[in-house]
Image (spheres, rainbow, N blue to C red):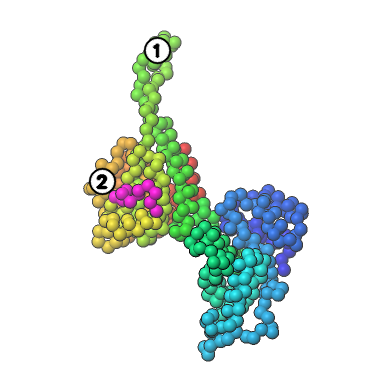
Amino acid sequence: MASLVDRHTGFVAALRRAGLPVSVAEGLDAVRAMRLVDLLDRESLRAAYAATLVKRPAHRPTFDTLFDLWFPAAVGDGVGAGPDPGRPARTLREDGRPVPAPLDPEVQARRERLAELLLAGDDAGLRRFARTAVAEYGRTPGQESWFSSGVLRAMSPETLMAGLLNAVLNGQERGGMAERVARRTFGDRIARFEDLVAGEVRRRIAEDTGVERTARLAVRPPLERLDFSAARRADLAALRREVHPLARRLAARLVQRQRRGRRGRLDFRRTVRASLASGGVPLTTHHRPRRPHRPELVVLCDASDSVSAFAHFTLLLTFALREQFSKVRAFAFIDATDEITKYFAPGADAADAMARMAAEADLVWITGRSDYGHALKVFEDKYADAIGPRTSLLVLGDARSNYGELSLPILRSMVGRARHAYWLNPEPRSQWDTGDSAASRYGELIPMHECRNLVQLAAFIEELA
């Protein structure tokens, strides 16, 4: 058993590895808070740690997962949580596998007990039941590891919904407000039971393989540090909320650079008037203020399989940028290029837009593999007028052209016509120029920035200032 000091330092280090910003001072604050709570009261200890270490609500699930690993509620089977020695053994087939749930009276009895706990909303009882169920069904014969799937398959909590609704509605009319409230309540309780099972499985795996290794495998980074390539459809809504303010800042930065880089026309009258104070010598020139305008944007993104997940982020960013620029034109390419602006209708779902783009856009020329050279040629032939002196060009891709032609003169011409041009690359900088990557050759013509998560996107925007 590790000492409390070892657990504290290991827990704080695991939070940092998971991407949570925890400073040394905050770690000391947590130690001071521990002196004021009952260390035997696990939930009070959790609250003390959370109050001193967690800064954003989005970080709380990661914190809770790691807390449960470093300060588990039980060790081994736990008190009273293991299989009952007096209970008959589970029925097994001839091949050693358990009998399916409909034929196993032991499983049916457990399902009835689970239904009672869900109906009563007994969280402590659900926690004990989850521990017992994992001990019984979390490891199948012949396997060394633990899995949630066996427990959930045996208990099938989602199939209990109809019985739970019948128990609480008691003959009331179906489909009304009462049923919707009850369905949501029981849905939350079933999700809570599934979370408890997953947590118990992680605890047992940590006992077998080590807490640190389990923490690295079980915890996803927080949203702002999640690689766009690892984002799932469930993450897209949260990413979209975070991208919108970044898009506003990006538009503001581009306008600021334009105002600083190019002054307005010379105001001759003010300049002559000011020169009277220096004997007619125009020591200071005055210029007319430039008329403010919203800049135009052209987004050119790689939609090949190698960056398909990053393309989801591209759509999210384009959705957000559309509200900040006077004109946004979006183009996608694989080995051919097509305009995809029409798929960006206000309120459209990013995943649906991606599916429509894949099905309808003319992105494939011959092989369907990335060909930056031919894609740039197609863009120049069909859409050269999209880039003008008021245009900001944003290229998003990994610069891997499968050893094909790069069309560097065409890209140089595009960059020369644009007011600003930037390239966001989703690959780690350490992988640039490896294999078929032409990152440095393209980077000589257009500033290239590593952009794998929201933190790096924010850093890119700040760098524009």
Residue occupied by mark 1: 273
Whole-percent x and y of residue 285? 40, 19
Amino acid type at circle 2 is Tyr
Q: Give the range drawn in magenta.
A: 339-350
Mark before the other along the chain sequence, 2 or 1: 1
| SS at badge 1 | helix
Identify the disc placed on residue 383: 2
Q: Can residue 319 be seen in this view?
A: yes
Give the numbered dot on residue 359.
Answer: none
Does 281 sit left or right of 104 as displayed?
A: left
Residue at position x 45%, y 50% from top?
240
The amino acid at mark 1 is Arg
| Rendered view: 441 above or below 296 | below
**Nearer the observer, 16 or 406:** 16
The residue at the point 40 percent across, 40 percent down is 324
Dot 2: what SS?
A: helix
* Residue 445 visible in the current orientation: no
Using the numbered discs, state the Cα–Cα distance from disc 2 to disc 1 in whole angstroms: 48 Å
Using the image, determine if residue 403 lies above or below residue 267. Answer: below
Q: Residue at x 29, y 61 (%)?
A: 368
